Image (cartoon, grey):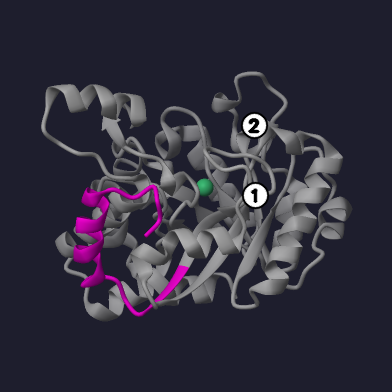
Amino acid sequence: MAAYLNEKDLEAIKILDGFLPDRIFDAHMHLSNYRFGADDYFGFEEYYRDVKDYFGNRQVRCMALATPTAEQKCKDKHISSIKFLGEQLDGYPECVGAILVKPEESAEEISSHLIHKSIRGLKCYHIYSKRSDTFNADIHEYLPESALEVANSRSMTVTLHMVKDAALADRENMRQIKDISKRYSNMRLVLAHAARSFASWTAIESVTELMPYENIFFDFSGICESPAMIRILKKFGVSRCMWGSDYNVSKMLGKAVSLGDGFYWIDKDDVAAIDKKASVRARHVGTENLMAVREAAIISELTTREIEELFYGTACKVFK
Ligand SMILES: [Zn+2]
């Protein structure tokens, strides 16, 4: 058993065993040769070791996203993380990967980073935008046109973890997502974390506007409450939705909850405080996410085949 899991995780894992299909394609997990969260380094070996408790002997494939760490603001360190991803993919031919793209990079530069045939996607992140309050960055400030051109010309994916408090309910985010989808119809845009709906209202109020945009998909990684996922499943169906673990974030104790008009990550310090007041025992993010996805599947009355699509089939088509 992975040392970090507790008995409440294990109880949930027993319940999940009756829910999860035989084949899994994790559409959003991370690898890193730099420290992130509690890990100094995490490759496929560490991933498969850590998810074994959840998946047992199931076949598990992955879309391995670059982990956006501060080190990679430096060009050399960025290149070394691309090489690391390439080496990792060499050992796991059933998996694909996504390299980090930064706003200052040209299409030629990005193309030169596609060093492995299994690199099928691009990953952008707000911390590389040129402003100091990067949590308020507009999409074009961290996802450059050059990256969209490369993804479009090679029929790749772009995984977008948007920012700004209102996420998809932010009018400028919505406008730019529609614009990207329309102008780059040969790439597939994956809106990470159910369109980053950690505050569930942000997707619930707005997501239906994206229904006509057929090259937009959702990954359900990291989301620990079911309402936004239920809304997306109902309006878009499983053919536009994919489960993802958000490993190694999945190893954190606690969960993200909608709170007020925003969201809050209950972390290990909060859990310690809650422990003194109530007889609840927290689980880890990976467990909370899978239990919320299961809850969404039950409420949405997904069939066995639809659950297989959500956990495997859709990702096979999107990351082809
Ligand atoms: Zn992630």
Task: Indicate the secondary structure of the residue bearing disc 2.
Answer: helix
The nearer-to-camera label among 2 and 1 is: 1
Q: Is residue 131 left or right of residue 39?
A: right
Residue 15 forms part of the magenta stretch: yes
Badge 2 crowding class, 10 Å Cα cut-off, few under 14, some 14 to 19, many 20 or more, is: some
Give coordinates of residue 17: x percent, y percent: 25, 70
Residue named by callout 1: 32
Q: Tell me the amino acid under the disc marked 2.
A: Ile
Residue bounds of the magenta highlight: 1-25
Which numbered circle lies on residue 127?
Answer: 2
Badge 1 crowding class, 10 Å Cα cut-off, few under 14, some 14 to 19, many 20 or more, is: many
Q: Nearer the viewer, residue 5 or 213?
A: 5
Residue 24 forms part of the magenta stretch: yes
Q: Is residue 75 left or right of residue 260?
A: right
Q: Are marks 2 and 1 in contact (CB under 8 Å)?
A: no
On screen, 18 above or below 83? below
Q: Nearer the viewer, residue 182 or 95?
A: 95
Name the residue at 59% across, 77% down: 94
Earlier-in-chain disc, 2 versus 1: 1
Name the residue at 86% across, 42% down: 76
Name the residue at 46% across, 34% down: 171
Q: Quadrant of residue 20?
A: bottom left
Give coordinates of residue 169: x percent, y percent: 40, 36
On screen, 103 above or below 316? above
Is residue 120 visible in this depiction of the protein?
A: yes
Give coordinates of residue 121: x percent, y percent: 65, 61
